[in-house]
Amino acid sequence: MKDVLKILGFLLLAEILTLFINVTLAFSGSWIFRLVTAVCTLAILAGLMAQAGHSIGKADRKLLKQKPDAVHPKKPVVLGLVSILPFQILWILLTLAKCGVLDGGFYRFYKLLCAPFLQVCNLVCDDVTAASLPVWGLVILAILSVIPYAAVIIAYRMTMKGKSVEEMMYQK
């Protein structure tokens, strides 16, 4: 439970930081500026989720030295799923809004609640109604919502194997 709360805490931190960056940098209408902002916010999301995976993996690695069967082998998968759950729920709601089941104005709330993807949303469709969002835009948003899952699992598994990013980058 502690690790789930840690993942959710890092997600909240990513939301706050990326929302701040989006608000401060997104006033330009230029698509190139939006693209740069989108890359930055996605990198922040990936970096923070990787940090969460590393932190949890480091604690689990230490625990495994004391008790060899203390960590369930499916733990990184569960943590990865927890990390994408908010994005997936909001994506489902956005899809329902696109289909007309929910109010089409939900798209503007989606943009704010999924701040790491806000500029991607603006690149795909400037409008604030879900009806104007193209289907390929929905697909892109679904694919991007997997970023936290990949970051958590990769960082967790690397840490459990005793690898550090520094070692891998500066290996001769």
Image (tube, rainbow, N blue to C red):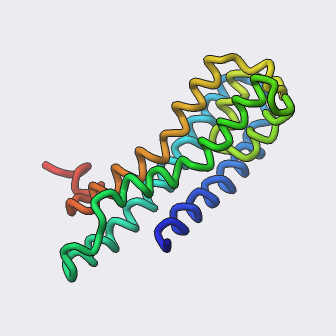
Give whichever of 95, 158 is nearer the camera: 95
Q: From what the image shows, is residue 91 above or below residue 64?
A: above
The residue shown at (13%, 48%) is 172
Q: From what the image shows, is residue 124 above or below residue 1?
A: above
Q: From what the image shows, is residue 81 above or below residue 117?
A: below
Residue 85 in the image, given as x and y percentages of width and height: 57, 49
Seen in the image, is 148 located left or right of residue 154? right
Seen in the image, is 98 located left or right of residue 7? right
The residue shown at (61%, 54%) is 14
Quadrant location of residue 9? bottom right
Give whichever of 102, 143 is nearer the camera: 102
Residue 152 in the image, given as x and y percentages of width and height: 41, 53
The residue shown at (51%, 55%) is 82
Seen in the image, is 111 located left or right of residue 5? right
Quadrant location of residue 34? top right
Seen in the image, is 170 located left or right of residue 137? left
Residue 144 in the image, given as x and y percentages of width and height: 54, 34
Q: Residue furthest left?
A: 172
The residue shown at (49%, 47%) is 148
Q: Residue furthest front?
A: 101
Give whichever of 7, 162 is nearer the camera: 7
Q: From what the image shows, is residue 147 above or below residue 97?
A: below
